[in-house]
Amino acid sequence: MRTLVEDDGDTIDITLQPVENPSKLEELWFDLERRADGSFFLSWQWIGNWLASLPRGTRPHALVARRGGQVVGLALLCPRTQWRFGLLRTRCWLLHETGERTFDRLFVEYNGILADRNCADAVLAACFDWLGQRLTNWDELVLGGLEPEAEAAVRLAAARQGHALQVRVADSCQWVDLEGVRRQGAGYLASLGKNTRAAVRRAMRLYAERGPLTYRVAATAEEALEDFHAMEVLHQASWNARGQSGAFSNPAFRPFHERLIAGGVPAGTVRLCRISAGDAVIGYLYNFVHRGRVMNYQGGFAYEADNRLKPGLVAHVLAIEDTLVRGEDCYDFMSTPAGHKPLLSNTEQPMNWIALGPDRLSRQIDTRLRRVKAGLVDRMRRLIRSPLPLMNR
C-alpha cells in the first residue's frame, strides 16, 4: 500500500509492506540513521535485535517514507487483533511493539519514527497523518513510550482527523543534565540535595571500611555477559523478596539482551558496570550509550539489613561521575517511578503511552471500562494505606 503526501510542494511517498528482506532493511536503516537524530531505541542496534527476536507468528511491516526517491523515514509496525477486557475485539497496529504482552515487556522508550534531520517535522507529520487515515479499516494505533516530537505529531494528526486519543500510561523520564553540573564547577555529588549527599557519603564511608570502592566497566563482550548473568542473580533476589517476578522472569529478556550485549559492547553502545567494596560486589548497572546520552536500562544490587548501605545510590553516583569524566552529555534514568530518580536527577520530561483511533462505540466503552478499573485500583490502594480501625475489646 502506498500514498502520496504533499509537504510544502515536495512529495513524500509512504509505503507499508511486510518485512521480507531484513538485510535490505538493515542497509536502508543504517543509511538513514547517519542522517537522523533518533534515540538508541530507533537505532539498528536495538531495532535489528528486536526484529531478529520476534515471537513466532509476528508479522512486522516496514513503513518507508521517501522524498525525491531518497528514504527520509523508517519505522516498523506490527498488526494484531487484541481483546480488551475479554469483550472488545480491537484490530491494532503497534509501533515497534508486537501486542504480545510478555515480549513487549522488553520496553521500548524514546519511541517514534526514524526521520532525516533535514525534514524530520515534515516526515513525522506525513507518516502519522497517513497512519491515521489508514485507521478507517482498523480500530487503533498503539504508540508506546513516545519521544516528545513524535507525540506532538500524533496529537496534531488525531486532531486533524477527529480521532479519539487515549493516554494509556502517563509517565516521565528523569535524567542528569551534565552540562549543568559542569557549569556549576563543583562536581556531581556537590549538586545533590543536602540529605541525599549526606546519605551517599555515609554509605561510601561504610563500604570503604571493607576495602576500596571500585567502579569497573566491562572491557569485552565476554566480561559484560558474565556481569549480566551476575546482575540477574541480584536483580531477581531483590524483586522476589518483594513478592514480584523481576525482569528476568520474562523468557524473552535474557536471550534478547545477551544478543544485544554481544554486539553492543564492541560497538560502544552497551556498558555493563560492576561496583565493588573490597572483594565484594555491591551492584551492577546495565546502560546504553548513544550520542552522548547514557541510559540506565537495568540494575541489580546487593541489599543488606543495614539501611545506611545504599548500593543503588552509590552505584549510580559513581556511574554519573564516570559519565562526566568521559565528557558525555547526560545520564538518563528513563521512565517508570523509582525512589532514587528524583533524588539524583535534575531534569525531566513527559513520556506517554498513547492509543488513537476512530471514535467508535467500542472505544467509548473501552474508555469507560478503563476509568472504572483505574478508580477501583486507586480505591484499593487507599484502603491498603489507611490504618485499620481498632476493634472494640
Image: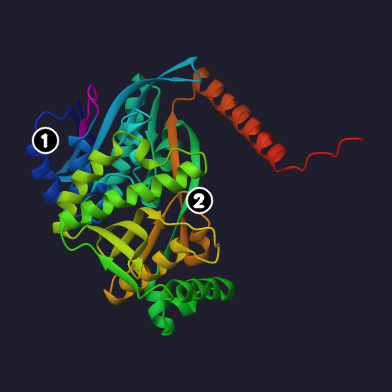
Q: How is the image coloured?
A: rainbow
x, y (%) of residue 95? 31, 36
Q: Residue at x 32, y 22 (%)?
A: 80
Disc 1 crowd rating (10 Å Cα; few below 14, some 14-19, many 20+) is few
How many labels sit on residues?
A: 2
Q: Residue at x 42, y 32 (%)?
A: 161
Residue type (three-letter) at the residue carrying disc 2: Pro
Q: Residue at x 24, y 62 (%)?
A: 291
Q: SS at mark 1?
A: helix
Q: Is residue 5 shown in magenta?
A: no
Q: Which residue is mark 1?
A: 22
Q: Are marks 1 and 2 in contact (CB under 8 Å)?
A: no
Disc 2 crowd rating (10 Å Cα; few below 14, some 14-19, many 20+) is few
The boundaries of the magenta stretch are: 55-62
Q: Residue furthest bottom?
A: 185
Specify which label sits upstream in the sequence, 1 or 2. Answer: 1
Q: Would residue 236 be found to the left or right of residue 322 on screen? A: right
Q: Residue at x 50, y 23 (%)?
A: 363
Q: Which residue is mark 2?
A: 337
